[in-house]
């Protein structure tokens, strides 16, 4: 399996060569030269497998430069009952016949990002050990991604995490989740400013190529291909759990932000998984929904991005979306370059009067959006009708999924976070606090470890140099 860039300017590379890198040198995203396809026999064998074996079958199609036994060991360490709460890893909850929720948020930070990030932690550690090198991961977070990265990288050899967050702007739960980590390789930097200030600092450091190289700075953002691959597994797992035979089709409803989760669903479908619809749900930040309904992709300015009660979907442009457009154009890199020359300048592109817009249907995509009132009503309704409590992001997926589903096809809605993380909205919906999962009862009372810095690039650089100079545990 070789990887190319969506913009056509990268010589084919192996998985391990693209694992630690962000954007391709030409500004595009890494993508397989061709997708592996699954035979009917293979699909039949996979139906009986547990998560770990299934993950190996799927991952080994995309990762062929790590010896099979090593990859098996990495997967066995990642997908455990200890880390994900059940042997099923992503258990299916059936609400009604042909109406299911796939629970993806039973990992350490109670959000679906753990499924990919936990694997990334072990993959990074393995690859760095092979080459005897180190990595300093620098990131900005407003909550979920940062904590998921920290819980995946804590205690890993050869890796330090420097995570910037807006001082005093995260929920108490989110701050406690990150700041209570006492691992020596985790550095929480609370920035006096807002999330955009944090992100600007990360961009400035990443653009300083000399500094980046000298101090081995890397990222774990959502364009990382390994994260997409890890997420393909649960589409298969969910399909097998919701069906009796491989003649059946299913539809998935996916609460979306950066298009990472649903991109994995798209790849699963390209591999041959019988998916009828990929139902994309956005919140009030509807940049993706607008595209799938109108053919116009119009990234928003950060100032136009609304703060909503499903905050992990508050995005102004969808970083993984370029991978889908590459496939939609029939893998025409020149077309992608043309379209993204507008996007990279903050402008829109319009496919509405082109044959490409019609082609979207062939890929199974439909979309809709949700808003605060719909989200609260959905949480209440699902709780009253099925005695199941969902979080705000999952509610967006449920709302749009129920509205757009093909009635004859089983629907699987992706549960992307636990309600415990969003107690304010849960209060509003059902008049009581969400239950805390075991182990999180007194999270906010634990001792916290973080430093506070001004929104100043040089100060952050100096801190990294000081801390990264020391030896790793
Ligand atoms: C990140 C996230 C999403 C959006 O997923 P994408 O892969 O960015 O589309 C949805 N819900 C929750 C809870 C998340 O953390």
Image: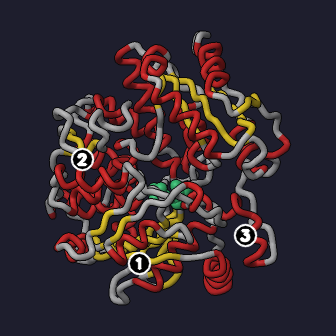
Q: Where on the picture, by quarter, is residue 210?
A: top left
Answer whether labels 1 and 3 touch (C-beta < 8 Å). no
Query: Label 3: few (<14), some or many (≥20) within 10 Å?
Result: many
Q: Is mark 3 within 8 Å of ligand 1?
A: no
Quarter of the image with the C terminus in it: top right
Secondary structure under the numbered disc 3 in the rendered image: helix
Ranked by sequence position, the earlier of labels 1 and 2 is 2
Give the residue displayed 40% in from the left and 32% down from the top: 123
Residue 20 in percent (x, y) is at 38, 30
Q: Where on the picture, by quarter, is residue 252?
A: bottom left
Give the residue displayed 66% in from the left and 80% down from the top: 373
Q: Is mark 1 within 8 Å of ligand 1?
A: no
Q: Please give the label number shown on residue 6.
A: 2
Q: Name the residue under label 1.
A: 411
Give the residue displayed 42% in from the left and 67% down from the top: 288
Ranked by sequence position, the earlier of labels 2 and 3 is 2
Residue 104 in percent (x, y) is at 51, 58
Viewer-nearest of discs 1 and 2: 2
281 to 258, vertically: above or below: below
Q: Mark 3 points at which residue?
A: 425
Q: Distance between the residues labelled 1 and 3?
A: 25 Å
Viewer-nearest of discs 1 and 3: 3
Query: Label 2: few (<14), some or many (≥20) within 10 Å?
Result: many
Q: Is residue 460 left or right of residue 206?
A: right
Residue 259 in percent (x, y) is at 41, 58
């Amino acid at each position: 399996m070789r990887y190319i860039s969506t913009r056509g300017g990268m010589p084919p590379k192996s998985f391990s060569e693209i694992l630690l890198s962000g954007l391709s040198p030409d500004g595009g995203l890494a993508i397989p030269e061709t997708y592996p396809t699954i035979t009917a026999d293979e699909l039949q064998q996979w139906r009986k497998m547990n998560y770990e074996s299934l993950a190996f079958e799927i991952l080994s199609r995309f990762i062929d430069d790590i010896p099979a036994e090593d990859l098996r060991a990495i997967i066995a360490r990642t997908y455990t009952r200890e880390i994900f709460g059940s042997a099923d890893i992503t258990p299916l909850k059936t609400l009604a016949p042909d109406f299911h929720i796939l629970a993806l948020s039973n990992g350490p930070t109670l959000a679906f990002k753990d499924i990919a990030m936990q694997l990334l932690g072990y993959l990074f550690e393995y690859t760095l050990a092979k080459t005897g090198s180190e990595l300093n991961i620098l990131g900005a977070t407003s909550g979920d991604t940062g904590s998921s990265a920290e819980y995946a990288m804590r205690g890993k050899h050869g890796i330090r995490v420097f995570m910037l967050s807006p001082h005093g702007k995260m929920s108490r739960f989110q701050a406690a989740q990150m700041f209570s980590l006492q691992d020596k390789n985790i550095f929480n930097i609370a920035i006096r400013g807002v999330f955009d200030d944090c992100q600007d600092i990360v961009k400035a450091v990443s653009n300083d190529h000399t500094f980046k190289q000298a101090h081995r700075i890397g990222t774990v953002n959502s364009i990382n291909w390994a994260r997409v691959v890890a997420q393909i597994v649960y589409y298969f797992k969910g399909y097998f759990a919701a069906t009796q035979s491989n003649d059946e089709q299913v539809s998935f409803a996916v609460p979306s932000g950066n298009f990472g989760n649903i991109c994995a669903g798209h790849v699963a479908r390209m591999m041959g998984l019988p998916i009828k619809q990929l139902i994309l749900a956005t919140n009030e930040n509807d940049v993706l929904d607008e595209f799938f309904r109108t053919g116009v992709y119009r990234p928003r300015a950060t100032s136009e991005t609304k703060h909503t009660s499903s905050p992990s979907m508050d995005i102004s442009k969808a970083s993984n979306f370029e991978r889908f457009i590459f496939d939609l154009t029939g893998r025409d890199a020149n077309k992608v370059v043309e379209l993204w020359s507008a996007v990279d300048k903050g402008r829109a592109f319009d496919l509405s009067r082109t044959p490409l817009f019609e082609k979207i249907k062939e890929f199974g995509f439909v979309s809709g959006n949700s808003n605060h009132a719909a989200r609260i009503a959905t949480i209440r309704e699902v709780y009253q009708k099925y005695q199941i409590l969902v979080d705000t992001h999952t509610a967006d997926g449920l709302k749009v999924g129920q509205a757009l589903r093909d009635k004859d096809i089983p629907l699987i809605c992706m549960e992307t976070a636990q309600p415990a993380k969003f107690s304010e909205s849960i209060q509003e919906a059902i008049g009581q606090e969400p239950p805390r999962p075991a182990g999180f009862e007194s999270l906010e009372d634990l001792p916290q470890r973080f430093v506070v810095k001004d929104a100043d690039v040089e100060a952050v650089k100096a801190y990294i140099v000081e801390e990264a100079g020391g030896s790793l545990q």
